[in-house]
Amino acid sequence: MNVTGPSPYFQFAGTARQALEHWRGVFGGEVRIATYADFSRTDGPADAVAHGQLVGGLQLFAADASETDEPFAATGLLFSLLGADEPDVLRHWFDALAEGGTVVDPLQQRPWGDWDGTVRDAFGVTWLIGFEASALG
């Protein structure tokens, strides 16, 4: 594994597999999953995700919270994808994350010329997506 900076690791209340598969559909890549049974864990259902990973251009981690873990919930936190890819790709990501989720602030051109918007996906993760006007060139 070659991680050069922080990568989010979400603990969900039983929806880690669905979140990872959804994000694979949005961002591409490959989903890798190990279950509680694979790790000989007994602190949750055998088929629950003990460790899951989206491997690709964007790397995300997720697991199903154990009996003693608090599942993911966040306010005041945005996962930034500003300039993370070409404008058309970022627009696609925004629209795909909005499916089953909520558009908090539409992806739009701002008075200073750049574009951004905020979307909360179906798993409660809030994404800030945007690009500089010069990227449209």
Image: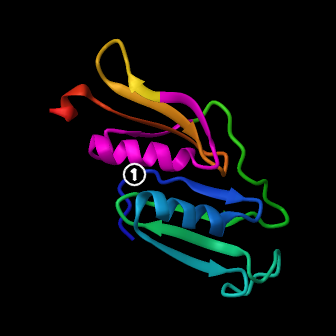
Q: Residue at x 71, y 63 (%)?
A: 15
Q: Residue at x 77, y 60 (%)?
A: 13
Residue 11 vertical placement versus 102 (above, below): below
Seen from the viewer's position, the closer of residues 32 and 115 is 115
Quarter of the image that includes the N terminus: bottom left
The stretch in magenta equals: 78-106
Tally of numbered tags = 1
Q: Residues within 10 Å of mark 1 (few under 14, many from 20)?
A: few
Residue type at mark 1 is Gly
Q: Is residue 112 magenta?
A: no
In the rendered image, which quarter is residue 67 located in?
A: bottom right
- Residue placed furthest toward the top: 111
Left-right relation of 112 to 73 = left
Quarter of the image that includes the C terminus: top left
Across and down, in percent, residue 103 comes to 58, 34
Q: Which residue is mark 1?
A: 5
In the rendered image, which quarter is residue 111 located in?
A: top left
